[in-house]
Image: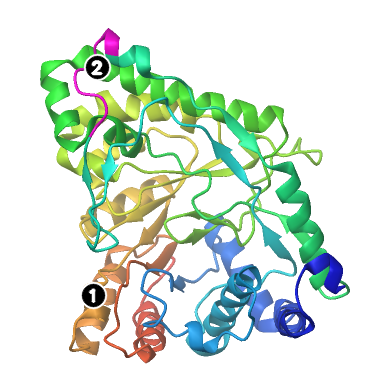
Amino acid sequence: MADKTGLDAADVRVLRELGEWQAEAAASPANQEKIAAWYAHDAWASVRRPMVLMEMRSWEEDEGPVNHADLRCQDPWARGIEREMRMLRHHVEVLQDDHVVSPYVSFAPPIGRSSFGVPSGRHREGGADRLAFNYAPPLARLDEADFSRLQHRVPSLNREAMAQTRERLEAVYAGILPVQVRDGRWQFTTCLTSTAFDLVGLEGFMLLMHDNPAGLHRLMAFLSNDETLFHDWLAEEHWLPLNNEADYVGAGSVGFTRDLPAPDYVGRARHHDRWHNFNSQESVSISPEQYGEYVFAYMKLIMARFGKVYYGCCEPVHNIWQYLSTLPNLARVSVSPWADQAFMGRACREKQVVFSRKPSPNLISFEKFDEQALLDHFTETVEAAQGCSLEIIQRDIYTTHHSPDRLRRWVELARQACAAWSAE
């Protein structure tokens, strides 16, 4: 076994012990209840409950509940797997949120894309905060000279790395868990404006709408076409895994649904067998009309290909609902801290779109942890989302002031507030 895994016996033992825990937890009644609840949630079943998720990925490792000191593996590859499994175990045993344990080990296909022929304009200063960056855009005027430098990205799959990863995982978990290829987090998310900003910058995008609208339309059409070509390649190469179970389908949500794959599915996933996540956080700086003209007009062409769409991340969407509401495959929408919750509650009820709430991370990250303020925050959401399918997902936590037990308490308070929610 050691030859195929490339690991020493101690590392293999750690991973197999965690695999045994995962296999047992996946088959447990508590896990099966969560799975049934996710399916009911997605289907807007008559008997359903709000789903509650805590995302533990944003902070530095020495700040969170699973850090370097907790890891026993020595090999970097094994440590990455160990950390993911220990985090999942922490969700299940300590936080007791609605994270589901899958009865298999998964890995993402190692898919890459070449550049546009110009460097990304995203610029980071040495020594700055890891989240801080500005733009030094490679394109300025979007004239013929600029477009002559652009080229469509060429996708690729590292088949050798994929085969090696599968072989290693199968060797590690032989007799315990099967291995599946599934989506990686954010691997196939479409964010046209994020890519556009990398090329022309924030200020450049704003000015181009006035100074060169035709050039900006040409750029957005180019980016939309580039994304379409990528998805065409994925379909032609048959590298589209299903993502209809405990798969990350956008802004923290997971993909349990009985609507996918499509009825004519015969073992090879196509776009309409899958979820896809779209967002345009950068659009907060422009009017709804400009969003419709420069963003939505180009994203909707890609959205139409998929079975179900999860839309949004941190941007408020109530002011662009006039566009989103026209999507027949819109299934979930991110209701960020800046959204009009009352409006979104009415909108989601009318269209039967899941109300995917992202509470403010401030209330868990302030130096003083005010439980009543957090409970009031949840109560406002529950009142707005009466009659909706509701999920509450905490994201973007960068500190707990060395009090990781706040995460468990957050889950308890969210469930307490959800007791007043009604499906009627």
Q: Amino acid at mark 2?
A: Leu
* Image coords of residue 313 (percent x, y): 34, 52
Q: What residue is shown with label 1?
A: 377
Report the side of 47 relative to 284 (left or right): right
Q: Amino acid at mark 1?
A: His
Q: Is residue 191 visible?
A: yes
- Front residue of 347/377: it is 377
Secondary structure under tag 1 reads helix
* Image coords of residue 64 (percent x, y): 40, 82
Magenta stretch: includes residue 140: yes
Q: Is residue 424 visible?
A: no
Residue that appears at 11% across and 17% down: 211
Report the side of 28 relative to 113 (left or right): right
Magenta stretch: includes residue 260: no
Q: Main secondary structure of the magenta part?
A: loop
Secondary structure under tag 2 reads loop
The quarter of the image holding the C terminus is bottom left
Residue that appears at 43% across and 70% down: 57
Q: What residue is shown with label 2?
A: 142
Which residues are the magenta region? 137-145
* Image coords of residue 105 (percent x, y): 72, 66
